Amino acid sequence: MREAQALATAAGLPVLEARMLLGHLTGYSRTQLITRDDEALTPARREALAALVARRLAGEPMAYLLGEREFFGRVFRVTPDVLIPRPDTEIAVEAALARLHGRARPHLLDMGTGSGILALTLALERPDAEVWATDVSPAALAVAQDNAARLGAGNVRFLRSDWYAALPEAVRFDLIISNPPYIAAADPHLVQGDLRFEPVDALTDHGDGLGDLRTIAAGAPARLAPGGWLLVEHGYDQGEAARGLLAAAGFAEISTARDLGGNERCSGGRLAT
């Protein structure tokens, strides 16, 4: 393993990333990599490592190379069909759990579920809940369903839907949550860093970044039970706009939570009873 790690670092990969790729390739834990330091890679694994190193040096995110990322203390499978889970989105989970406190057997809806991090985390934190998870992408839904099976979230119903379009008319929810595409089409970040490799339709509405937020806010009152909540993640500079959309849709008790960097990140409001 020492030789393989040396080859990876000599190519320009940081030591930690080299160890992570080796662990992924071999299935060895960090301790096993140390105790088996003199073990040589097979030719096939050496070739596979070289391919992973090349992809990483080209900028491909580690989450896609490893096929997983931790979120809210759980490991989720991720592929290039879904966004990479980010710690800032945990703010939305915390906001949702706070609003559900004291409410038994809540009905929840996560729209644009992607890998399922919001729907599944809420389902596992609140096993008494009935959770719906929708996405317009069949590939994303397949990843979310696989994560549900892996994590044992049996109280989640998956549905392919373009926002509210495929939801049964009679269904009402106590809380709707979404991390929709909110990056403006002209934002230079779309061609920088990890975003270059993530699904563009999950990042941007191909407009001003507020299009999907408008659709979600405007449609939520017809899908919420009296006193139900809507929570949406948004860009660091979209808090004021998000609060305005919620107010225009008739929501009260509107507030915005800040992420780990102190940026406005998740806004929500309550439907009047």
Image (tube, rainbow, N blue to C red):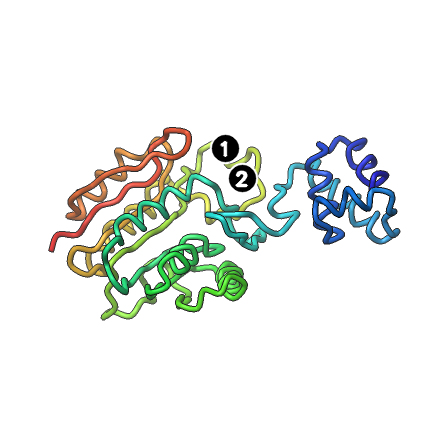
Classify residue 137 as left or right of residue 267.
Answer: right
Q: Which residue is mark 1?
A: 189
**Identity of the residue drawn at 23% across and 42% down:** 245
The foreground one among 164 and 175 is 175
- Do the numbered discs 1 and 2 sit on residues whose CB atoms are within 8 Å? yes
Q: Quadrant of the C terminus?
A: bottom left
Element class at badge 1: helix
Count residues near mark 2 (Cα–Cα under 10 Å), then give few for <14, some for 14-19, many for 20+: some
Image position of 155 with respect to 140: above or below:
below
Q: Earlier in the sequence, mark 1 or mark 2?
A: 1
Number of the label disc, if any, that sits on residue 238: none
Q: Which residue does the image show at 25% across and 68% down from the upper left?
A: 171
Q: Residue under label 2, please give it.
A: 195
**Left or right of 9: which side holds 266?**
left
Q: Residue 198's x, y, as percent?
A: 54, 45
Question: Which quarter of the figure has residue 105?
Answer: bottom left
Q: Is 150 rendered above or below residue 247? A: below
Q: How many marks?
A: 2
Name the secondary structure under disc 2.
Answer: helix
Indicate the position of residue 269 as horizontal and vertical percent values: 21, 46
Mark 1 Cα within 10 Å, few/some/many (few <14, many 20+)? few
Residue 27, position as x, y percentages in the image: 72, 53
- Name the image quarter holding the N terminus: top right
From the viewer's perspective, tell me whether residue 17 is left or right of residue 145. right
* 266 relative to 110, above or below: above
Q: Residue 179 placed where, x, y %?
A: 39, 48
User: What amino acid is at disc 2?
Assistant: Leu
Q: Amino acid at mark 1?
A: His
Q: CA distance from mark 1 to mark 2?
A: 7 Å
